[in-house]
Amino acid sequence: MQEKLYEFLKSRIEFPTCVHGSVKGRSYISNARQHLRSEFFFLVDIEKFFPSVTMSMVYSALKTLTTPEIAEVLTRLVTIENRVPTGSPISSFIANVSLRELDVQLMAICQERGLVYSRYVDDLTISAQWDFRHTDVSKRVLAILHTTGFRHKKEKTHFSKGRTEITGVVVARCRLRPTAKALKNLQEAKGKQANEPRLRGLRQHIRNINKVNEERFSTRQL
């Protein structure tokens, strides 16, 4: 039922360009790519993400897309115990729908300041070429997050400068790079037959990162 509902809703909803999780044609790599050429970063991790997406949030979001009656039925189909369940095939999609207002507000703040904003599921990234660490940007971002019903993980919310890991990919100014952990895992998986599927996955991960760099370099040469 949820998979059919997902297909139905997917064809009727277009997400902002800042959203990269559970959106066709976008990924954790496209999320990191948005921040190429940036030097300063503010990273935020939403605490208890799916349980924080409440039935009322889902209903409010769906009501803007259809009638209140249909929105109520859909909301009951995609929530359990008044929350979006973790692990459901439609959970990330419904969370994206429910966070549209948050994304719109954060995009507006960032556009005002010449900042880049993106979100991959529960990971928020804001970046710029200029140093915004001593401005009110972080305070405003967290205030909006809290006002919309979410909390941030304090231990995973921080500023960064220079080479920065974003959703499992290192952003190093004009290039994306695999993390040291990914390279280490690749070396450890080589030669181990039992790890063949893992080895293929790691190689594809690195190929996808390199593909972004090759595409950007080719474009600059034209």
Image (tube, rainbow, N blue to C red):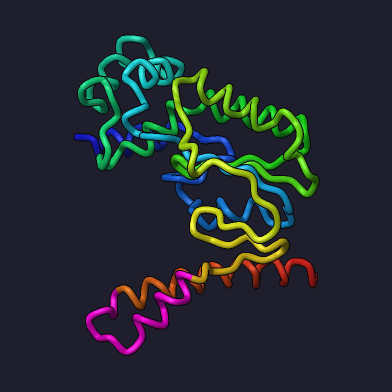
Q: Does the magenta stretch include residue 182?
A: yes
Residue farthest to the front, as pictured:
155
Residue drawn at x 65%, y 32% is 138
Q: Where is residue 40 in the image (x, y as percent from the top left)?
A: 71, 49
Q: Where is residue 201 in the image (x, y as percent from the top left)?
A: 37, 71
Residue drawn at x 32%, y 39% is 7
Which is more toward the observer, 71 or 87? 87
Q: Quadrant of residue 193?
A: bottom left
What span is in magenta? 181-197
Q: Is residue 154 magenta?
A: no
Residue farthest to the top, as pictured:
68
Q: In this view, does 72 lie above or below 209?
A: above
Indicate left or right for 152 with 214 as reference: left
Q: Quadrant of residue 102?
A: top right
Count all numbered tags in the image, as a single digit.
0
Residue drawn at x 43%, y 20% is 61
Residue drawn at x 64%, y 69% is 213
Indicate left or right for 31 with 46 as reference: right
Quadrant location of the C terminus in the rendered image: bottom right
Determine the main secondary structure of the stretch shown in magenta.
helix
Indicate left or right for 103 with 203 as reference: right
Q: Where is residue 66 in the image (x, y as percent from the top left)?
A: 40, 17
Q: Quadrant of residue 60?
A: top left
Q: Is residue 88 above or below residue 150?
A: below
Q: Position of residue 121 (x, y in %)?
A: 44, 41
Quadrant location of the N terminus in the rendered image: top left
